[in-house]
Image (spheres, rainbow, N blue to C red):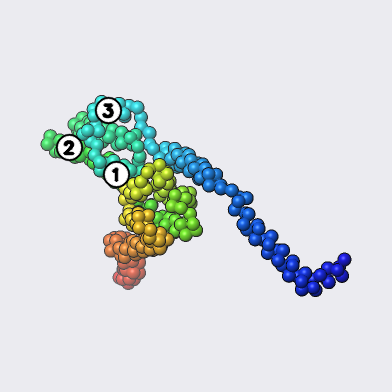
């Protein structure tokens, strides 16, 4: 059997015949494979639709999920707050578009947050005025003229009017500082996702899952942007909302790059790499600025705290020697 096989392989005509047979079978398979596979476009489109619905459901659950220290992405208000706001029509007198944008940048979303803000804008000045009047005229019995006591009450009234705005401004600054520190890392993650072949929606979703370790607020914003990219018909609106909710210049640069990439077809990876480097440079410049401002800030503490102790340590032995010699 083996000797016969070796004889056939040694015969050139047998080798040529075998080669022709293999080529013929391969050609028939190449021609027949497309007809055997069929058209699976409908199945692929169906799988994409199912994946889209699954993304929507997951993002909806994330928006309703509770985050540490908060009651979810939307903050609930009490019933009595809503009744007072509606009864006195506070939305006509105290509500402004700037206040709504500030609430969104502070992380307070939805009509419930606006109701709570309007309620405290009404209650805080009234409460401080009543407490100040009670202490100034009744409890403390201050030895002051009536106009001076009245000026104190008016000052408390002004503080009550500005207190909600000051609280909102401080919350915005802390939240923006947290997001600004974590945003370059988020851009690096987004760049990796885009260059690996992911779409922008999948990239935003992945970044929202990973960046929560550095900044919960930034993870919330990426999650909301992912949901808006799935819901809104215009993607540019979702990007603009992302910038309006954060108020960061770095986010504005990224939004501009994303819009231009979709409009003109420019490479998104190169634009994201440039913006990411700029964000890192800005973060380094802020750190250097803080380091450069330390010497002037330390001048007064050094004069008040360190120099007296230093003089005491240096002068005490000399004083002791002089007094001992006498």
Residue 249 at least partly seen: yes
Residue that badge 3 annotates? 86
Task: Establish if 35 lies above or below 144.
Answer: below
Towards the viewer: 220 or 200: 200
Residue 312 at least partly seen: no
Q: Quadrant of residue 326?
A: bottom left
| Of the image marks 2 and 3, the number of the one nearer the N terminus | 3
Task: Establish if 308 lies above or below 217.
Answer: below
Residue that badge 2 annotates? 154
Residue 47 rendering spot, x and y as whole percentages:
53, 44
Can you tell which mark lies on residue 301?
none
**Residue at horizontal 25 percent and vertical 33 percent from the top:** 91
Inter-mark Cα distance, 3 to 1: 21 Å
Residue that badge 1 annotates? 102
Q: Secondary structure at mark 2?
A: helix
| Of the image marks 3 and 1, the number of the one nearer the N terminus | 3
Towards the viewer: 81 or 147: 81
**Residue at horizontal 32 percent and vertical 63 percent from the top:** 289
């Amino acid at each position: 059997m083996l000797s016969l096989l070796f004889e056939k392989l040694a015969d050139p005509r047998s080798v040529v015949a075998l080669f022709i047979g293999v080529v013929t079978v391969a050609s028939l398979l190449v021609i027949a494979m497309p007809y055997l596979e069929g058209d699976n476009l409908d199945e692929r489109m169906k799988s994409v639709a199912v994946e889209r619905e699954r993304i929507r459901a997951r993002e909806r659950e994330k928006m309703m999920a509770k985050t540490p220290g908060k009651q979810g992405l939307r903050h609930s208000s009490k019933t009595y707050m809503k009744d007072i706001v509606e009864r006195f029509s506070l939305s006509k007198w105290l509500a402004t578009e700037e206040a709504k944008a500030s609430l969104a940048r502070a992380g307070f979303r939805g009509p419930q947050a606006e109701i709570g803000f309007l309620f405290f804008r009404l209650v805080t000045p009234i409460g401080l005025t009543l407490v100040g009047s009670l202490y100034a005229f009744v409890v403390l019995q201050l030895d002051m003229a009536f106009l001076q006591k009245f000026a104190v009450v008016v000052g408390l009234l002004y503080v009550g009017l500005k207190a909600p705005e000051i609280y909102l401004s401080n919350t915005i600054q802390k939240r923006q500082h947290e997001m600004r520190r974590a945003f370059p890392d988020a851009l690096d993650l987004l760049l990796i996702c885009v260059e690996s072949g992911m779409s922008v929606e999948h990239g935003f979703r992945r970044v929202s899952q990973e960046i929560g370790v550095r900044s919960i607020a930034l993870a919330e914003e990426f999650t909301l942007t992912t949901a808006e990219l799935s819901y809104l018909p215009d993607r540019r609106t979702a990007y603009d909302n992302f910038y309006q909710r954060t108020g960061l210049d770095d986010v504005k640069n990224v939004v501009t790059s994303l819009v231009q990439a979709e409009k003109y077809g420019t490479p998104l990876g190169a634009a994201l790499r440039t913006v990411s480097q700029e964000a890192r440079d800005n973060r380094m410049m802020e750190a250097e600025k803080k380091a450069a401002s330390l010497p002037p800030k330390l001048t007064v503490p050094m004069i008040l705290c360190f120099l007296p102790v230093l003089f005491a340590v240096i002068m005490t032995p000399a004083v002791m020697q002089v007094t001992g010699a006498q």
